[in-house]
């Protein structure tokens, strides 16, 4: 089955609902980030891939300076390595005999580092690596409060010593994800909270190095700290796992204050009915456009219509949605297409098999979303 989309077709002709990338905006977002990091000693980019899951975007990020990539799932890491993106931090712990075997195999072909926070897991990784004649790179995940995996900072030194005793693994360093920072709206307060963590990490790094434990990798920070992490006075080369900046979504925009990155991802939808003057139905639903907020997956907030004022309410069902309007800024006619800015780009992107890449209102490329569903 095919929708017979082709490059060169008009955006309005694409079968809806459809996932669109505005290529000019995507390229601008990637450039804005890369320009800021060029020449910075304090930090480097290791962009997170869990949102778009597209190696072609990773390649664009690497070409302009990213030192590697990060992602949460082993399956996605395998896919990226197959596509030639070979410097990967897996921001998760890996369990299960078969997954560990897959990790061993991947370690033979790429510079892959995986998170650890448990001695038993390290033992499993080391045993499997030795049996498979390889070595697995590990980085200790630091505990960042409720919802985070990881080891408390005070326990890192003794854990690192245990890791060093294991022959099948190679200790690379430390990584962390302080997810709560995105919810701190004041940039000054967010900076204070982030610097507090970076200060603790700096002390920890010194303590480890004082006892002869080399810390090659320090990886923390993400889009909401993009212009904070590099400024820390004591640390250098901290890897910033920024992900959402490539597409952005309205929640990151409004909650995290990331207006500098524009909306590159939208969902194209068609009006299919106007049963009452103030009501219209559209062919999108939660199966094609997420409805939850980036930082609180329980809050239903819904998408926003791009370039359309006067939308009072949006009620999403699985496949269709109803919007209520009050003095809309453009006419709402059946058959017309509209674009939606999702509240959460990552969960929207994973609902589609393909991305339609648009420039000058035409389809310039179609990128198949092979990365979705890889775990
Ligand atoms: C471990 C880790 N690193 C980086 C990120 C990227 O965050 P953002 O997309 O806000 O840059 C996430 C997002 O959840 C994450 O879980």
Image: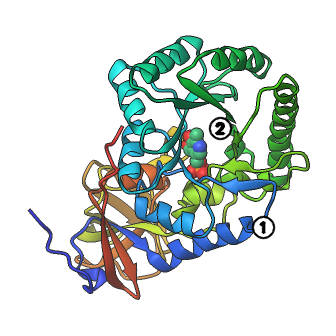
- Residue at 69%, 28% (x, y): give it: 142
Q: Name the N-terminal-most of marks 2 and 1.
A: 1
Q: Position of residue 298 (x, y in %)?
A: 49, 36
* Residue furthest out toward the right: 233
Examine the rendering and report whether any part of residue 328 can be seen. no
In whole angstroms, how far apart are the C-alphas of marks 2 and 1?
24 Å
Residue 75 appears in which quarter of the rendering? top left
Quadrant including the C terminus: top left
Q: Nearer the viewer, residue 257 or 76?
A: 76
Residue 176 appears in which quarter of the rendering? top right
Structural crowding at the residue carrying mark 1, measured as other residues with C-alpha within 10 Å and reported as few (<14), some (14–19) or many (≥20)? few
Examine the rendering and report whether any part of residue 74 can be seen. yes
Residue 39 is marked as 1
Q: Helix, strand, or loop for circle 1?
A: loop
* Residue matched to label 2: 177
Quadrant including the N terminus: bottom left
Structural crowding at the residue carrying mark 2, measured as other residues with C-alpha within 10 Å and reported as few (<14), some (14–19) or many (≥20)? many
Q: Where is residue 28 in the image (x, y as percent from the top left)?
A: 58, 76
Q: Where is residue 339 in the image (x, y as percent from the top left)?
A: 39, 71
- Residue at 48%, 64% (x, y): give it: 59
- Residue at 64%, 19% (x, y): give it: 163
- Residue at 84%, 29% (x, y): give it: 209
């Amino acid at each position: 089955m095919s929708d017979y989309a082709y490059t060169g077709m008009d955006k309005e002709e694409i079968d809806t609902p459809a996932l669109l990338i505005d290529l000019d905006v995507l390229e601008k977002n990637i450039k804005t980030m890369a320009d800021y990091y060029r020449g910075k000693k304090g930090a480097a980019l290791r962009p997170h891939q869990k949102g778009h899951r597209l190696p072609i975007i990773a390649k664009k990020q690497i070409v302009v300076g990213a030192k590697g990539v990060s992602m949460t799932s082993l399956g996605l890491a395998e896919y990226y390595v197959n596509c030639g993106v070979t410097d990967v931090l897996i921001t998760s712990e890996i369990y299960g005999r078969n997954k560990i075997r897959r990790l061993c195999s991947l370690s033979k072909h790429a510079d892959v580092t995986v998170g650890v926070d448990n001695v038993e897991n390290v033992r499993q990784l080391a045993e499997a690596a030795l049996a498979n004649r390889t070595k697995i790179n590990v980085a200790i995940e630091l505990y960042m409060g409720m919802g985070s995996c990881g080891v408390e900072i005070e326990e890192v030194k003794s854990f690192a010593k245990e890791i060093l005793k294991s022959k099948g693994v190679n200790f690379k360093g430390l990584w962390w994800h302080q997810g709560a920072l995105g919810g701190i709206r004041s940039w000054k307060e967010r900076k204070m909270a982030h610097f507090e963590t970076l200060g603790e990490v700096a002390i920890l790094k010194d303590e480890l190095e004082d006892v002869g434990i080399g810390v090659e990798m320090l990886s923390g920070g993400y889009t909401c700290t993009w212009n904070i992490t590099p400024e820390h006075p004591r640390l250098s080369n901290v890897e910033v796992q920024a992900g959402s900046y490539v597409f952005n979504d309205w929640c990151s925009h409004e909650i995290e204050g990331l207006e500098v990155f524009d909306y590159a991802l939208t969902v194209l939808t068609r009006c299919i009915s106007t049963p009452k003057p103030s009501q219209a139905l559209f062919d999108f639903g939660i199966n094609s456009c997420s409805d939850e907020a980036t930082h609180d997956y329980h809050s239903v907030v819904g998408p926003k219509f791009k370039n359309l004022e006067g939308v009072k309410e949006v009620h999403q069902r699985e496949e269709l949605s109803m919007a209520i309007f009050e003095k809309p800024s453009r006419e709402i006619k059946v058959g017309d297409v509209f674009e939606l800015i999702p509240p959460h780009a990552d969960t929207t992107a994973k609902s589609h098999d393909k991305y339609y890449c648009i420039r000058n209102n035409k389809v310039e490329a179609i990128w198949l979303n092979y990365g979705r569903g890889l775990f």
